Image: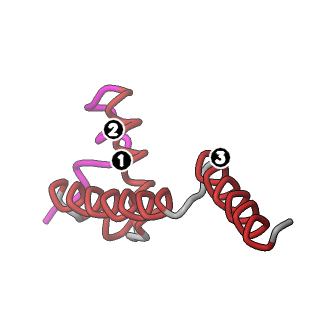
Amino acid sequence: MALLRHFLSGKILFSLISSNQERYLKDELFGCFKHIGIPFQVLEKMPVRDRKFYIAKHNGIVEEEEKKEKGNTIDGEMINKYTDMSQLSDINSRKKNGK
């Protein structure tokens, strides 16, 4: 009985696609590993549709966090409005106190 051999090594797999596709695939796999924490052993066996789902889910969570963070920031215009209100409050209190 002949020994079984791997028929798709990593080198052969990536030689069948264009260099742009290879780069995109490697970036996608690395991103899943680094940002989502999916081990490479799991990524090797994961169907593409599942990987795309997890990437979309992760990106959705990141976008929501960015929106919340953006809503909590104070820009120059908000600071100006606050100082204007503070100055008006000081002016009104001086008028009431006769200063």
Quarter that holds the N terminus: bottom left
- Residue 17 at x, y percent in the picture: 27, 31
Q: Within the magenta stretch, is there residue 10?
A: yes
Residue 34 appears in the figure: no
- Residue 14 at x, y percent in the picture: 33, 38
Q: How many marks?
A: 3
**Residue extent of the magenta highlight:** 1-18
The residue carrying mark 3 is 76
Picture quadrant where residue 82 is located: bottom right
The residues tagged by marks 3 and 1 sit, at their Cα atoms, a distance apart of: 53 Å
Q: Is residue 2 left or right of residue 81?
A: left
How many neighbours does mark 3 have within 10 angstroms: few (below 14), some (14-19), or many (20 or more)?
few
Amino acid under label 2?
Answer: Phe
Q: Secondary structure at mark 3?
A: helix
Quarter that holds the C terminus: bottom right
- Residue 67 at x, y percent in the picture: 41, 58
Mark 3 against mark 1, which lies toward the viewer?
3
Q: Within the magenta stretch, is there residue 4?
A: yes
Compared with residue 26, is residue 92 higher up or lower down, i.e. above or below?
below
The residues tagged by marks 2 and 1 sit, at their Cα atoms, a distance apart of: 6 Å
Amino acid under label 3?
Answer: Gly
Label disc, if present, on residue 35 of the rendered structure: none
Foreground pick, 67 / 40: 67
Q: Is residue 31 left or right of residue 79?
A: left
Label disc, if present, on residue 10 of the rendered structure: 1
Residue 31 appears in the figure: yes
Amino acid under label 1?
Answer: Gly
The residue carrying mark 2 is 14
Q: Secondary structure at mark 2?
A: helix
Q: Are marks 2 and 1 in contact (CB under 8 Å)?
A: yes
